[in-house]
Amino acid sequence: MNIKYWFSIVYLFTASICLSGCLFSSESQQAREVVNQFWQAVLNDDMDTAKNLTTWDSTQYLQFLNSKSVFAKRFETGEIKIDGTIAEVATLLYGGEKGDMAIPVRTVLVRNKDVWQVDVQKTMGSMVSGAMDAVADQLNIFMENGLKDLDSALSKSVDELNQSLKQGIDELKNELASPPSSPVNPSPPSNGHAI
C-alpha cells in the first residue's frame, strides 16, 4: 500500500475525532445556554420566554415555577452530562433571605430536532429533593449553632454557680474561724430590791 494512502486515513481519523469533539463542545454549549436562558426567565417571571424553552408536554408545570414559588435570587450552572438526546446540567439555585442557601438542581433537557428544551417535570423532581437536602443542611447548621450557644450558656451558668458556692464557703469558713462575740450581760435592776 501507498504511504500517502495511510497518511490520508490517519488524517481523516484525526479530523473526525477533532470534529466530534467540537460537536460535543457545541452541544454542551447549546445546552448550557438554554439552561441559563430558562432559569433567568424564571427568575425574571418571564414565563413566555421560559415556555419557549421547554418541552411541549412539560409546559404545564411552569405554573409551579413562577417567581413567587421559586424563592431563588440567582443561579449558577455547572457540569453537563449528555447521553444521546438527554442532557443534565448541574444547577445551583441560591435562595433564602440572604440568598446564601444553595439548592442543588439537575436541569434536565431533551433534544428535540435541533434544539435543546428543558423538561420542567423532571427538573422539578430533582428540585424537590435538592430543596429537602438544603433545608436539612440548614436545620443541621441551626441545631449545631443552637447547641453551641446552649453549651456556652450552660457553661457560663455553671461557672457563675461554682463561683457563688466558692464565695459562700469562704464566708462560712471565715465566720467559723473567728471567735464568737461575748454576749452582753443584762444589768441588774436599779431599784435595789432583790427578788
Image: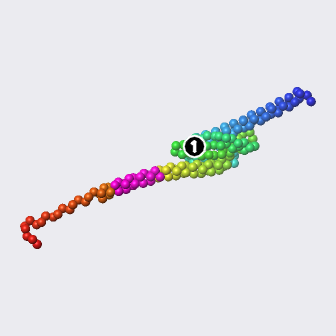
Whole-percent x, y for residue 3 in the image: 89, 27
Whole-percent x, y for residue 58 in the image: 67, 48
Residue 153 drawn in magenta: yes
Q: Residue furthest right?
A: 1
Q: Residue at x 65, y 43 (%)?
A: 90
Q: Residues within 10 Å of mark 1 (few under 14, many from 20)?
A: many
Q: Specify the amino acid type for callout 1.
A: Tyr
Whole-percent x, y for residue 176 in the image: 30, 59
Q: Residue at x 55, y 43 (%)?
A: 100
Q: Quadrant of the C terminus?
A: bottom left
Image quadrant in which you'd find residue 165 = bottom left
Question: Camera-side residue: 127 or 159?
Answer: 159
**Is residue 116 at least partly visible in the picture?**
yes
Q: Quadrant of the N terminus?
A: top right
Q: Residue at x 80, y 34 (%)?
A: 16
Would residue 166 be found to the left or right of residue 102 on screen? left
Q: Which residue is mark 1?
A: 94
Would residue 111 be found to the left or right of residue 75 on screen? right
Residue 122 drawn in magenta: no
**Secondary-structure class at tag 1:** strand
Q: Residue at x 60, y 41 (%)?
A: 75
Question: Camera-side residue: 123 or 138?
Answer: 138
Report the span colored magenta. Answer: 151-170
Name the dominant secondary structure of the magenta segment: helix
In this picture, is 110 found above or below 168? Answer: above
In this picture, is 14 found above or below 91? Answer: above
Would residue 151 be found to the left or right of residue 183 on screen? right
In this picture, is 173 found above or below 6? Answer: below
